[in-house]
Image (tube, rainbow, N blue to C red):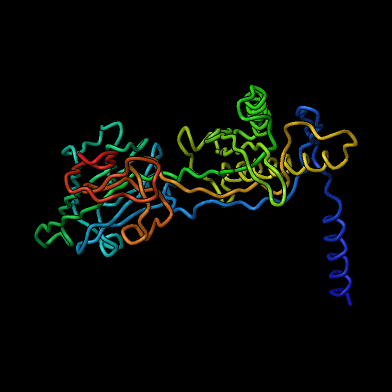
Amino acid sequence: MEASASGRAWRTWRRARASGFPLSRAAILLFSAFLVRAPPSVEYLVRFPRTFRLTQESVKIVGSSNFPVKVYVMLHQKSPHVLCVTQRLRNSELIDPSFQWHGPKGKIVSENSTAQVTSTGSLIFQNFEEAMSGVYTCFLEYKPTVEEIVKNLQLKYLVYAYREPHYYYQFTARYHAAPCNSIYNISFEKKLLQILSKLVLDLSCEISLLKSECHRVKMQRAGLQNELFFTFSVSSLDTEKGPKPCTDHNCESSKRLSKAKNLIERFFNQQVEVLGRRSDPLPEIYYIEGTLQMVWINRCFPGYGMNTLKHPKCPECCVICSPGSYNPRDGIHCLQCNSSLVYGAKACV
């Protein structure tokens, strides 16, 4: 009986809570002759890459005597601890161990400011840079017991810089327009971009105009009319300046970008609602209902690419292009280039 009563009380509390959340304040924007309000707060669908995160100090990576071990370090972040032992040796007692690390630029000393070697032989990178990507080799000398002779072990690691994808939303919308050579279309375009930019400013997102064209359109069973075709994007400012790792499953930049998308969609829907309530003739320039379209764009920065076959542990990371490949622009994959000899190549020379 007590369990049943507590269950009913729990369900009652959940229903009350579900219906009791207040709406957030609405932001008001004046757009030409329209009064447009931002939407109340809603549940947001957060979309972000399921990247393999290795920035926690607690993460430790062991080597293998059979093959090089791949290590992924987010650009400008601290690396995990790369150990100079195999999994078997990690659980064993080592007598008089000696560790020596070599990287792309030669021997690594413990006093190095960017790559440090601890007293137990762990390699740790501070503020990892693109140029630090490459092959790292650890030479280990030890005795299994005091009576046995010294044993030698060589462990190789392939260390890659990686970044979050440059992800953004791309929108297209059409407006009934003034004649295509009219200066009013240019003024309207500037005003639209200003308002959209202000709409997402508090979310640390930015609007970029990708294309704006005026065309004469023959309507179905009607005459010609002038239309403006707008293509613009909304992206996170954090992504542009250099991504920061997410601390939990809610990636902050992705969440803000999703909020910005919802604000923009609401903005255009409000224009339709306001036009529907007008008793006056329609203005010369107005949004055409149903023409707003949106796509999610995922791109890697130049010099980086995705490769699920080569990097199965980091399938949605933008990993730095290895020698023999390059990415010249915001593409998704590194392209083959036999003459490329460096990591992160942006051109095939």
The residue closer to the viewer here, 213 or 42, is 213
For residue 63, say whether it is visible: yes
Tell me residue 53's x, y (percent).
Answer: 44, 51
Q: Residue at x 72, y 32 (%)?
A: 285
The residue closer to the viewer here, 106 or 283, is 283
Image quarter where the C terminus lies is: top left
Which quarter of the figure has residue 147?
bottom left
Which quarter of the figure has residue 320?
top left
The residue closer to the viewer here, 339 or 185, is 185
Residue at far bottom of view: 1
Tell me residue 30's x, y (percent).
Answer: 78, 27
Tell me residue 71's x, y (percent).
Answer: 32, 51
**Is 41 situated above or below 312?**
above
Q: Residue at x 53, y 43 (%)?
A: 168
Tell me residue 45's x, y (percent).
Answer: 64, 53
The answer to whether residue 300 is left or right of residue 100 is: right
Image quarter where the N terminus lies is: bottom right
The answer to whether residue 92 is left or right of residue 9 is: left
The answer to whether residue 2 is left or right of residue 259 is: right
For residue 116, say whether it is visible: no
The residue closer to the viewer here, 316 or 198, is 198
Q: Residue at x 63, y 36 (%)?
A: 228
User: How many discs appear?
Assistant: 0
The answer to whether residue 195 is left or right of residue 167 is: right
Which quarter of the figure has residue 70?
bottom left
